[in-house]
Image (spheres, rainbow, N blue to C red):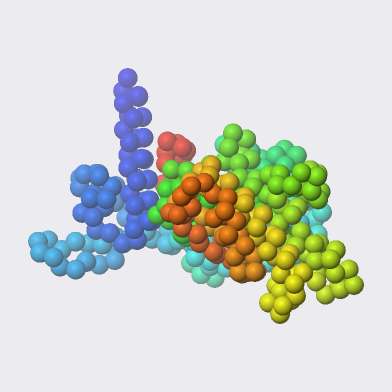
Amino acid sequence: MSTLVRGNRDLIKAMNRSLILNTLRREGVLSRTQLAEISGLSIATISQITTDLLQNHWISEIGEGEYTGGRRQTLMRLNPDAGSAIGLKLMENRVACTVTNLEGKSLRYRDYAYDAGSDPVAVSNKLAEIALDTLNSTSAPHGRLLGVGIGVAGIIHPHPQGGIVHYSPYFGWQDVPLAQMVQSQLNVPVYIENDVNTLTISEQLFGSGRHVDNFVVITIGRGIGMGIVINQRLHQGAQGGAGELGHITVMLDGPQCSCGKQGCLEAIAADPAIIAYVKEKIPNKQHVFNSLASIVDAAEAGNAICRAALNRSGEYIGMAVATVINLLAPQTIILSGEGVVAGDQRLAAMREAMRTHSFNDLLDDVRIVIEPTDDRMWARGAASLVISKVFESPLVDANVSG
């Protein structure tokens, strides 16, 4: 019985510790009294846990707040240099890598070209090499290294040891334990997650999802993906495959998708689909329209076919987003990815389709945020996967960092 009681006490302490860290993460700078008011914990509990966090350098005291009568209050915040994380965004022939502090600030960013093919052993060796090389080239103070996060397109099975690539469309992998393969070469934990989910975690920790209980991130670019947060928790689905928005069927007998099926949203509305559409309609200028940017420029200059291609993409994406609204009723939708730089040529049609196809007034209270994303942001997302472990509730993971 004493072991059970002791275990319960340890769990409660870990839960309170997580609550305090998350409150400081969300709010920024607080006094102990403010922490107690927001968290609902007693001043005695706040004092005990913050003392421990101060001793272990997870938080810092930064002076006194404004005098409002009575005893002056000492202000505290997270110590951004308490730890660091390495984030790797894995692509077919490139890896974007960053080292961030605890607040997600990039301390070092590098982009690596590599030629490891699709062999999992060769890829894992290269990832470990890149992680070490980037960390060793980081001159800024980075504290204790908390781990390495890897973001990759595909379905990632949740796994206690960091995740298994169940399916990768670009590498043709099936059930590859990539996290364990990389971790075997490093002395820190390695985690792997679907790249859109890592971006979603980053938005929850540091971005437009910071104070939002229910939101989705929809990425538009080479593919179309979605990350889902429900009641402040990332929703991965039973097998880690939730959020494959790009592979819902929107056109029966439509063009073939990279997944092998026909009529997927991705095959009709993603960036490569726009390029293919324009090249089909203007076959004598295929060399001109070989990028989304060239099509956007032509559309803005008045090219009707390029404009129609972008509008068509936006309309189909808007129909899909309306379906998401009808199913999940999120507070916020964050539209991200490289493809949002197409601007209103694409997004105006998307918004109109959202209004047309969303149910009743569900769209009225949804905040739409547009955030273009580059490789640096994808890498930061992968690092956020590691940082999220610091703030994860012990009810989710009993191995709370300390």
x, y percent for residue 185: 66, 49
Q: How many marks?
A: 0
Answer with left or right where residue 97 lies relative to residue 57.
Answer: right
Task: State which quarter of the image contains the N terminus.
Answer: top left
The answer to whether any part of residue 255 appears in the image is: yes
User: What is the x, y in percent for residue 121?
Assistant: 76, 47
Q: Quadrant of residue 310?
A: bottom right
From this view, report whether residue 254 is shown above or below residue 307: above
Does residue 132 appear in this view? no
Which residue occupies the extreme bottom position in the image?
301
Identify which residue, 102 or 324, lies in the foreground.
324
Above or below, comparing residue 216 to residue 276 in the picture: above
Q: Residue at x 68, y 64 (%)?
A: 311
Q: Which residue reaches farthest right?
A: 284
- Residue 191, position in %: x, y? 59, 47
* Along the line of sight, the residue nearer the viewer: 241 or 37: 241
Is residue 394 positioned above or below 317 on the image?
Answer: above
Q: Please state if 198 lies on the left or on the right of 280 as rendered.
A: left
Q: Residue at x 85, y 69 (%)?
A: 282
Q: Residue furthest top?
A: 1
Name the residue at 43% across, 43% down: 231
User: 144 or 374: nearer the eye?
Assistant: 374
The image shows residue 77 at horizontal and vertical percentages of 33, 60
Please tell me which residue lies in front, 389 or 52: 389
Could you say which quadrant of the image residue 54 lies in?
Answer: bottom left
Residue displayed at 53% across by 42% down = 327
